[in-house]
Image (spheres, rainbow, N blue to C red):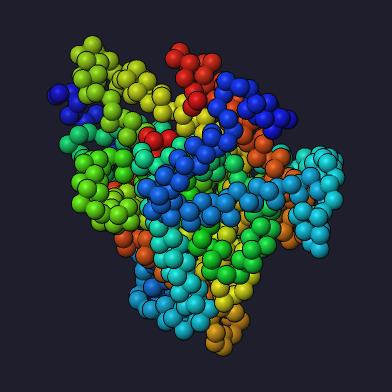
Amino acid sequence: MHTLRKMRLFDYLNYLFLIVFSCLMLYPLLYVFSISVSDGEAVWRQAVKLFPIGFNLEAYEAIARANAVVRAYRNSILYTVLGTTFTLIVCLLAAYPLSEPRFRLRGPISLILGLTLFFSAGLIPTYLTYQGYGLLNTIWVITLPVAFNFWFIILVRANISTIPRELKDAARVDGASDFRILLQIIVPLSKPILATIALFVAVAIWNDFFNPLLYLNNSEKFPLTIMLRRMLIRGATGEVVQGNYADTLQAKAFFRQVKMATVIVTLGPILLVYPFVQKYFVQGTLVGAIKG
Amino acid sequence: MGEAVTTGAALLPEKPGPRSRLHDWRGRLEREIRNNWQLYVMILPVLVGFFLFRFYPLYGLQIAFKDYNIVAGVRGSEWVGLENFLKFFEDPFFFRVVKNTVVLGFWTLVISYPLPIVFAVLLNEVKQQHGLFKRVTQSISYLPHFVAVVVIVGLMYDFFSSDGIVNQLAVALTGEKWRILGSSTWFRPLYVGSVVWQGVGWGSIIYLAALTGIPPELYEAAIVDGASRWQRILYVTLPGLLPVISVTLILSVSSIVSVGFERAFLLQQPATYSVSDVIATYVYRRGLIKFDFSYGAAIGFFDSIVAFALVVAANYIVKRTNEDREGLW
């Protein structure tokens, strides 16, 4: 094993490369944070390149006062929580019957629902159908369709089939109903896979721009992603942040800080929990890859 | 036709009569539902949801073959056969959007597909005694995957703007500013670059997992045989990755024609349409913004057929080229 432990030129270059790589991944995020908390004057002079210069939270205060951003934040939280809850409920309601051998329609139903993994109607037909249901501009169009994902059902079903039969049989002998078995045996024993799915769905909804763009046109209902587009891409930060700002370079620099602060509060929830839940994400991808 | 056959078969004397068979079937169904009614209650809302949100929209796909008008609705609109598809092939923008989609998809595939493999192999070369360094690098590399596309593109608008950080660097180095945003030359590099930044680390997960499956004895034996590091990578690491590589390759080939909507849509500006307008964004603009629903549906349908055909073709090619004749199916 001696040769495997010794560092050679290749190793130094490799390590150097990996460090540079990590810096490239982190730099944009650090830069955004630094701009958002630096002194207005330093930002205006374009002095901030890496670490914050000075410290001020005015940009964050401006966000907290901006009704549109606060509302969008609330909407994003609502959509994420609701959509994730629906997804978990659907997963459990589907995966338990589909893993029960005595359920005769198990095979045909799995086959039919499995088709949805390969075929989708596409943008326009889906849009017209949801419009026909009267779902446009409702929170349901963002939170309900996302819950019917056969992929997640497969993951939960695979997990349920690893639960020893005897547990369910014993419960049934004791007179437990299917609902009771689902709630008191399946759910507690499926927690890890449910947590993994919840994380995936939550991030997907939190970051989703496509569905809100298509289905929502009432600004009261906009989530953060739509707000971010208005501010960062459409340059409408001035309208979003209420207040009297002259058309000066200082004001422009301040708007930049507000944009970056909005990015930080958007990434915040993900960055905060990321170190703790990362392993679930990795497991989730791998389970998916192996099962697929 | 099917009905006639059944009736005929039922009339044959040696088979049980239709009545008793029906009765038997009914009885079994009743017993099944009585015993398992709770399972049916559970699955019912799931079936309703899948029907409403996944299957019923497929029925609406027929508007691709109709001249949809809002008053008549999906059902009542007039059939026009393949007219919408022919219209697309004759569309002056047909060539442009198809070319843009394929070129963008091609470069994304060629550049962003191999990089996770390279990254995984390099991480695999990190010494065992430096496990922490490896884990931290991994964690950092996954991070961009969780950043919303709209945030990434939004930040690009800031970083690459005329007085953004990139141009500050450009001025420091070359003394002049580059026009990057809204420039047709820069659109593709920006697009592919953002895909790479976001996806390299995350894409490597599956390869890193495959690498842990390679027995360490193989490396030790290779060292005993005097294999250099390159030889070890070439003859031990890469063959160990090959099964995974063939699967991921099949799955990513269809991405050539299905360039994601969000990134292209957010990054494009009318000034760059000549390179940035792809099928997905064109469908959105024509179908939903200009209310040409049937036309948009037809283009979308055409796109998904091509994507499906590409997956089948890639699977066929992979099957023919590898020794075990194994593809995805």
Question: In the depicted view, which residue is nearer to us: A44 or B212?
Answer: B212
Relative image position of residue A267 (x, y in whole percent): 41, 63
Judge whether A257 appears above or below A84 on screen. Answer: below
The answer to whether B252 is drawn above or below residue A210 in the figure is above
Residue furthest bottom as drawn: A244
Left or right of B199 in this view: A283: left
Q: Which residue is at 58% across, 30% downward?
A: B17
Question: Which is more toward the observer, B165 or B286?
Answer: B286
Q: Residue furthest left?
A: A2
In the displayed structure, B24 sits above or below A69; it is above
Name the residue rendered at 36%, 40% in the picture. Answer: A102
Identified at 50% across, 42% down, the residue is B26
Residue B272 in sight? no
Does residue A96 appear anywhere in the picture? yes
Side (left or right) of B302 relative to B144: right
The N terminus of chain B sits in image quarter: top right
Residue B139 position in % (x across, y down): 31, 48
Number of marks in the image? 0
The one of A162 and A245 positioned closer to us in this rendering: A162
Picture quadrant where residue B214 is located: top left
Residue plotted at (59% across, 85% down): A246
Q: Nearer the viewer, residue B14 or A75?
A: B14
Residue A121 vs A64, above or below: the answer is above
The residue at the far top in this view is B225
Q: Position of residue A277 (x, y in %)?
A: 29, 54
x and y percentages locating residue B181 in the rendered image:
62, 56
